[in-house]
Image (cartoon, grey):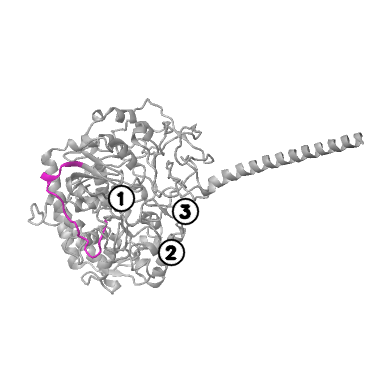
């Protein structure tokens, strides 16, 4: 009996041990599965998706309650930490989730009749686009991606022209760059163009950043462009989990980044390129001649031989490249120009563009042209120009699939439209579209129209030379922020120059790589430099519009793309615009002498911004501010077009290029 009891006890002990072992194995297996699942979920469902293109570095806060990019406290960043390669990303949208407030798809967009008081908002908050940031194979990212399915976009099929240059940058490609860990959230886009070349050789009396030597820069700026330094960059692999509140615990590796040398075309070189474009351009020979061609050749001759006008009671002639030619060209446009508008195309992509927000230029132009009896014709044989009446903004709203990272269906829709026109009419086929034009303010418009409308005159807000903008053919379209369609001139004007106490002002979202750098140098650093991220309404505090009306200089720093509504806003509020956006072609470039009323600062010279502005004599500033007030008439929308207003100036730029391409 004792033996039998002992045997049964041994069996029970073995059973217990076996069950315990099996349980332990199951626990280990479950933990392994949970760990793998966590990594997968972290990769697939992270709220802060990151997609980039062109060797850029960006981080979006993974907090589910925030659609704003996180910005690193300026105190935690070294100057050298801010240098990286250029991010070429389209403005305003990441994976269907806006970087700015108030964005949504059509059902939630503010209606035409909404006249809520939004005069004090950052202009890029109003009607942002649904954009994606793309990632290529050469990119390392701070953060975790939802997936690796982002579509790589092909690089541009062109290069900037090589210009004669004897002035080199302080800093050459191939540096290692360090973005060190910090206790606060990482910078939205820790990226700056490597070695932007200073092509300014003859600044003359014009004000721009190249007029100052690098010896005037502070120590931080010298460190930024020192050749002998070898900073490193710490990057986070895509498989690492990110703590929402800090990145200091993320393991990082050092990796050398080979950066392509990027050419920066100065405003003076743009002037030369514009002139050479007229001399070198070879017009598309029509398949058959017409009376219109002969008429335009006569117009060209009359403009070239216009009588010299040295003074004019209505205009400051110094605002123009050639005032005599401009005035004669404008007069001939009013007398002769006829435009045919295609009726084809379904709404809202065609014939129904936005009239409010940052894309309003394309809407107001279409609305006012279609109601203009002077310029319209229904006889194709009499038309000098043919208008393709689509809205780049409505095209994106209607057809872009969130998270698809593809614009193929948008391009296909435009291609189908062109094919319809070609099949139905001979007008396109006569010149292969060279006498056709479009007006588009969306950031994607250059890429969408680059091939299918290659010969057309393209009036674009995004006038980046890297994106294929062509002098002598394409037209720089003003990006105008219309807050009230019923009263587009609301709050027009500002204080006289003697009452503008603030040296410089900027406020806006941290779009792109440049603005965080601007804030790192100047936010809360100098009482004369009112540089902010977002302004919030608070009792007793100055509003966005009040700052612009009270500042001497308004900083127009690029966002994700080179264009910004702040350029026109500065003129609207009679503030001298300071444009910080390399390779940006400003509006009406073929007509206006921008250096007479605006300041151009190279992106690399942000550390020297205050010195540049203070170097401008008071008499020069006063003259520039007066010229801003004089040039303002060319940038204003009216309920009905007014002579020399923005509608007529857009049309004149298109007419001008049509005449000189004949």
Which numbered dot is residue 413?
2
- Helix, strand or loop at label 2? It is helix
Looking at the picture, tell me which residue is in the foreground, 574 or 64.
Answer: 64
C-alpha separation, residue under disc 1 versus residue under disc 2: 25 Å
C-alpha separation, residue under disc 1 versus residue under disc 3: 22 Å
Asked if the residue at tag 3 contacts the one at tag 1, i.e. Cβ–Cβ closer than 8 Å, the answer is no
**Mark 3: few/some/many CA within 10 Å (<14, 14-19, 20+):** many
**Horizontally, is 336 left or right of 407 in the view?**
left
Dominant secondary structure of the magenta stretch?
loop
- Helix, strand or loop at label 3? It is loop
Which residue of the protein is positioned furthest toward the top in this rendering? Answer: 228
The image position of residue 167, as x and y in percent, is 28, 33
C-alpha separation, residue under disc 2 versus residue under disc 3: 17 Å
Q: Nearer the viewer, mark 2 or mark 3?
A: 3
The image position of residue 459, as x and y in percent, is 30, 58
Vertical arrangement, residue 203 with respect to residue 405, above or below: above
The image position of residue 575, as x and y in percent, is 18, 48
Q: Which residue is mark 3?
A: 405
In the image, which residues are magenta? Answer: 480-503
The image position of residue 426, as x and y in percent, is 36, 70
Which numbered dot is residue 563?
1
Looking at the picture, tell me which residue is in the foreground, 322 or 361.
Answer: 361
Please report whichever mark, 1 or 3, sits nearer to the chain's N-terminal start: 3
The quarter of the rendered structure image containing the C terminus is bottom left
Vertical arrangement, residue 387 with respect to residue 321, above or below: below
The reply to whether the magenta stretch includes residue 501 is: yes
Vertical arrangement, residue 211 with respect to residue 584, above or below: above
**Horizontally, is 641 left or right of 62 in the view?**
left
Which residue of the protein is positioned furthest toward the bottom in this rendering? Answer: 378
């Amino acid at each position: 009996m004792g033996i039998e009891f002992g045997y049964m006890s041994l069996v029970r002990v073995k059973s217990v041990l076996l069950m315990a072992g099996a349980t332990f194995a199951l626990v280990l297996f479950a933990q392994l599965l949970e760990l793998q699942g966590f990594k997968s979920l972290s990769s697939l469902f992270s709220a802060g998706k990151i997609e980039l293109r062109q060797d850029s570095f960006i981080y979006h806060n993974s907090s589910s309650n925030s659609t704003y990019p996180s910005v690193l406290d300026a105190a935690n960043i070294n100057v050298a930490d801010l240098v990286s390669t250029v991010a070429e990303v389209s403005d305003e949208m990441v994976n269907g989730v806006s970087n700015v407030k108030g964005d949504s798809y059509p059902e939630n967009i503010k209606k035409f009749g909404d006249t809520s008081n939004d005069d004090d908002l950052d202009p890029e908050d109003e009607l942002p686009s649904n954009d994606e940031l793309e990632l290529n194979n050469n990119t390392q990212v701070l953060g975790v991606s939802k997936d690796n399915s982002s579509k790589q976009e092909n690089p541009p099929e062109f290069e900037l022209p090589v210009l004669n240059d004897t002035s080199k940058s302080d800093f050459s490609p191939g540096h290692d760059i360090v973005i060190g860990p910090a206790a606060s959230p990482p910078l939205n886009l820790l990226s700056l163009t490597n070695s932007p070349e200073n092509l300014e050789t003859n600044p003359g009396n014009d004000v721009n950043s190249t007029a100052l030597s690098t010896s005037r820069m502070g120590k931080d700026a010298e460190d930024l462009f020192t050749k002998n330094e070898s900073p490193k960059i710490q990057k986070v692999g895509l498989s690492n989990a990110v703590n929402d509140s800090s990145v200091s615990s993320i393991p990082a590796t050092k990796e050398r980044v080979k950066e392509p040398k990027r050419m920066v075309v100065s405003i003076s070189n743009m002037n030369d390129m514009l002139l050479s474009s007229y001399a070198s351009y070879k017009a598309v020979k029509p398949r058959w001649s017409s009376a219109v061609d002969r008429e335009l050749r006569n117009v060209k001759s009359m403009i070239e031989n216009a009588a010299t006008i040295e003074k004019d009671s209505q205009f400051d002639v110094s605002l123009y490249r050639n005032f005599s030619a401009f005035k004669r060209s404008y007069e001939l446009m009013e007398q002769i120009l006829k435009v045919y508008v295609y009726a084809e195309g379904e709404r809202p992509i065609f014939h129904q563009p936005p009239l409010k927000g940052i894309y309003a230029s394309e809407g107001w132009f279409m609305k006012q042209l279609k109601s203009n009896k002077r310029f319209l014709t229904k006889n194709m044989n009499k038309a000098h120009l043919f208008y393709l009446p689509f809205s780049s903004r409505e095209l994106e709203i209607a057809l872009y699939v969130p998270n698809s990272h593809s614009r193929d269906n948008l391009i296909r829709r435009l291609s189908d439209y062109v094919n319809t026109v070609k099949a139905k009419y001979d007008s396109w086929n006569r010149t292969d579209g060279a006498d056709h034009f479009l007006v588009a303010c969306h950031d994607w418009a250059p890429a969408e129209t680059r091939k299918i409308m290659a010969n057309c005159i393209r009036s674009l807000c995004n006038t980046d030379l890297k994106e294929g903008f062509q002098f002598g053919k394409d037209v720089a379209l003003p990006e105008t922020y219309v807050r009230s369609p019923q009263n587009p001139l609301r709050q027009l004007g500002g204080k006289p120059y003697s009452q503008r106490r603030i040296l410089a002002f900027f406020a806006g979202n941290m779009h792109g790589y440049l603005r965080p750098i601007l804030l790192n140098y100047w936010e809360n650093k100098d009482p004369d430099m009112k540089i902010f991220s977002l302004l919030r309404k608070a009792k007793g505090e100055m509003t966005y519009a009040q700052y612009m009306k009270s500042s001497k200089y308004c900083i127009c720093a690029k966002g994700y793309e080179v264009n910004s509504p702040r350029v026109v806003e500065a003129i609207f509020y009679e503030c001298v615009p300071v444009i910080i956006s390399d390779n940006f072609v400003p509006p009406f470039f073929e007509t206006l002498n921008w250096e007479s009323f605006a300041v151009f600062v190279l992106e690399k010279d942000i550390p020297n911004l205050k010195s540049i502005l203070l170097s401008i004599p008071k008499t020069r500033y006063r003259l520039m501010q007066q010229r801003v007030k004089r040039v303002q008439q060319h940038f204003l929308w009216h309920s009905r077009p007014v002579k020399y207003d923005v509608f007529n100036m857009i049309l004149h730029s298109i007419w001008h290029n049509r005449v000189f391409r004949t």
